[in-house]
Image (cartoon, rainbow, N blue to C red):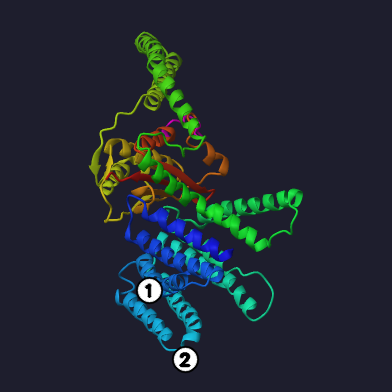
Amino acid sequence: METFALAAISFIIAVALLIRKKKNPLQIAFASLCLALFAQEAGKFFSDLSPSAFFKGLHYLGAFSVPPLAVAFSRLFMGKGFLPRRVVALAAAGSAATMAVFLFPDTAPYGDRLIFFYTALVLSGCYLALLLFIRSKAVGTERKRMTYAALACGAAAVIGMTDLLAYFGYGGPRLSEMATAGLLYFFLLTINHPDLPELYELMARAFIVLVMILFATAVFFVVDGLFGKGPMPEFAIVVMAALLIVIALDPLRQVLRKAFEYFFPESKDFFTSIYGFDEELEKEKAALLEEMATGLAHEIRNPLGSIKGAAQYLQSEVEGTEGRKLLDVIIEETDRLNRVVSQFLDYAKPFRLDLKKQDINRVIEKAVSLIRANHAAEGIVVETDLNPNLPEVEIDAEQIVQVILNISFNSVEAMPEGGTLLFRTSRIESEKGDAVGIAIRDTGRGMDKEEMQKIFKPFFTTKERGVGLGLAICRRIVKNHGGYIRVKSIPGQGTIFYIRLGVSP
């Protein structure tokens, strides 16, 4: 069962990657490796059931293909410049030499062991190359992702060692197939979601999968215990079946979506979650707010204008300091209410995007120049770390500048005693398509979890005279660009805003 489950998971992951419209070389290499693993495991499973030359040939074809394809994937995963192309050719030559063992009757019985040790040798070499790459080449977010990959590979290797106990006659379940399936899923997350740089984000996804597997296993044993009449299956088999279902669910959904789009191109998206209705409700509420905003602003602004005009007229008539001070307060508060109404209109009115392909680095440099010229940023060190190899992104530059300025001046206010404001850009390749990432980081007071949960809500503010619409407007602008914005903060250490903007084809 474990062999069959690993074969099925490998096949579904490979198909899900290959049917995508946009595939990068790394995804193609990983899909090829999964197909080789599928051939190896499927051939082994069916040849055990029915001795057949075809299934044995399929098994050996996959086994001989895994080492060079693993090297090819490792080369792309670490960057083409680290491992030369000849290493892939060398691994392929080694597989061919191993295959030659089966041509001689005296050495053929040792062929399976030789394949195992050769594959283990090649995979160990890939792992050592990854460790060397982390130590010598990887920096920043890339270093984090590579470190997590090295930890995952090491954990899978340790778990897979349990098979040696069974080989030498000791009891215990065989866990190598389960560990390999988990490792495949981890790499699928890593190459499909390079915008998840933190360990807790990857671990959160893995934890959700683990909970679903344990829940499915528990449900099976409860149902079997209540209604089953025969002996219960082995625990490892049930867990592997649950792993197959849970891990294969998302790739299988992609395969089925493509099939439905092919046969029913005019049909609705049957795979939209029922929670998608919440988005429709939000759109209706936004439309109602837009309809009310203009009339409400008109009804408020007219009296405000009259109040301010009357106060300004009385300033020339009133004699005495106290009376003038009271009128100054009326004018100041009237102006503040007018600004509140203006921000409310900015939030409620529909945004009209003037989309043009732009170099996001130039947009950020423009915003940075405005920040440096503002007296409020005195004492703040403004730094940039802009990736020069970014694709152009279709945006409304003025609105994105507004987003950057709103976030930046909030960051400046969070550093009253000075600090560092850092702007970083990165290229993101994921299943949703190519994108650019913008990170704005400060070393200010930070926020607690409660503040982070409310920070994008309209009219939430921690400022004494704030309106609480600036970040709500930022999120709406980014969302209208088809992107998203999120925040991470540690009290006393600072805050970082992540913005992702998609690249048009």
Q: Is residue 386 above or below residue 94?
A: above
Camera-nearest label, 2 or 1: 2
Residue 468 x, y percent position in the rendering: 46, 31
Magenta segment includes 60: no
Main SS of the magenta part reads loop
Residue identified by numbered label 2? 106
Question: Foreground: 189 or 48?
Answer: 48
Q: Which amino acid does label 1 sit on?
A: Pro
Q: Which element carries disc 1, helix, strand or loop?
A: helix
User: Image quadrant of residue 26?
Assistant: bottom left
Residue 248 circle label? none
Residue 344 x, y percent position in the rendering: 41, 24
Residue identified by numbered label 1? 68
Counting labels gives 2
Q: Which amino acid does label 2 sit on?
A: Asp
User: What residue span does the magenta drawing correspond to?
Assistant: 460-470
Question: Foreground: 174 or 86?
Answer: 174
Q: Identify which residue is drawn at 52% across, 41% down.
A: 452
How far apart are the alpha carbons under marks 2 and 1?
26 Å
Would residue 255 be seen by someone viewing this image from the given angle?
A: yes
Question: Foreground: 376 or 4?
Answer: 4
Would residue 143 be seen by someone viewing this image from the given angle?
A: no
Residue 73 x, y percent position in the rendering: 38, 67
Mark 1: give few (<14), some (14-19) or many (20+) Cα within 10 Å: many
Residue 34 x, y percent position in the rendering: 43, 63
Q: In this view, does 419 lie above or below 64?
A: above
Position of the N terminus, as image quadrant, is bottom right
Instruction: Name the side, left or right, on which 1 lies relative to 218.
Output: left
User: Image quadrant of residue 167?
Assistant: bottom right
User: Image quadrant of residue 238?
Assistant: bottom right
Q: Identify which residue is drawn at 25% across, 33% down.
A: 354
Q: In this view, does 366 lie above or below 160?
A: above
